[in-house]
Image: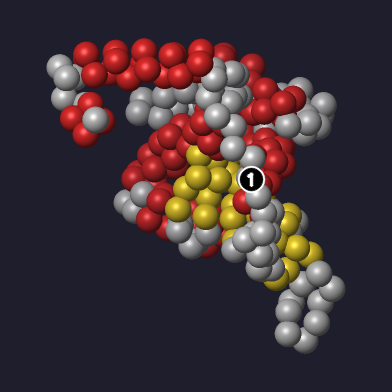
Amino acid sequence: MRQIILDTETTGFYFDKDDRLVEIGCVELVNRKLTGNNFHVYLNPGRDSDEGALRVHGLTTEFLRDKPVFSAVVDDLLSYVRDAEIIIHNAPFDLGFLDKELSLLGRPRFREHVSGVIDTLVMAKEMFPGKRNSLDALCDRLEVDNSGRTLHGALLDAELLADVYINLTRGQDALLMDVASSEDAGGLVAVEVDLSGLVLPVLEANAQELSAHEEVMAQMDKSSGGKTLWRKIA
């Protein structure tokens, strides 16, 4: 499975206005392993960065003046990401800017070039509700070393996000094992595990938990005007 971790930096925060891309950074995962086959480019946006954005990435107009415009790198970018699964933190932001750049060139939207998009911000909010889920916060929570991150950079952030994603999804590979390569198996194989003899403990709700549950159910029943299905069945 080929996955691409993608991040961008921009002149500002509003793709639906005049802001443009100034940096794209991608790292490649194949079977959840970093390959070193990265894609990284700085872009000349044809305008200055807003002060707020400049404080984030530090990419000045002078630095970007001799860099290529998006149209000069678009074919290389689309060839690199084609048919891969794309992983982005806060995907609507990056996709908004990529779609804008593609639309200016008469190209299809970014999603039409790839097999799918995973938003790690959505994943993190589901796993850690009510907590800060910025990339820095996730690095701290998942013990990913981000000590070298003084300014945001698309390639550095993509590399950090790759580590964060592996940590967020580690349980998904519980039944995958690295084994010695053989003629029949190429190293990473799926192992079937018989769980039929496993006895799981049953934790019953206590009186306080049952009471709290009943209160919530009653509130839902009241708000629906007594139309909740479980009341009718009961």
At 73% from the left edge and 55% from the top edge, which residue is drawn? 34
Question: Would you place residue 2 above or below residue 53 in this image?
Answer: below
Give the left or right position of residue 187, taking residue 88 as reference.
right
Q: Nearer the viewer, residue 44 or 5?
A: 5
**Position in image of residue 96 (x %, y %):** 41, 36
Q: Nearer the viewer, residue 148 or 198?
A: 198
Question: Would you place residue 26 above or below residue 119 in this image?
Answer: below
Q: Nearer the viewer, residue 115 or 221?
A: 221
Residue highlighted by disc 1? 200
Q: Secondary structure at mark 1?
A: loop
**Residue 67, picture quadrant:** top right
Any part of residue 224 in sight: yes
**Position in image of residue 152 (x %, y %):** 67, 27
Give the left or right position of residue 183, taking residue 40 as reference.
right
Of the residues shown, which amino acid type is indicated by label 1?
A: Leu
Give the left or right position of residue 93, taking residue 68 as reference.
left
Q: Residues within 10 Å of mark 1 (few under 14, many from 20)?
A: few
At 35% from the left edge and 44% from the top edge, which residue is drawn? 104
**Position in image of residue 91 (x %, y %):** 48, 37
- The quadrant in which the C terminus is found is top left
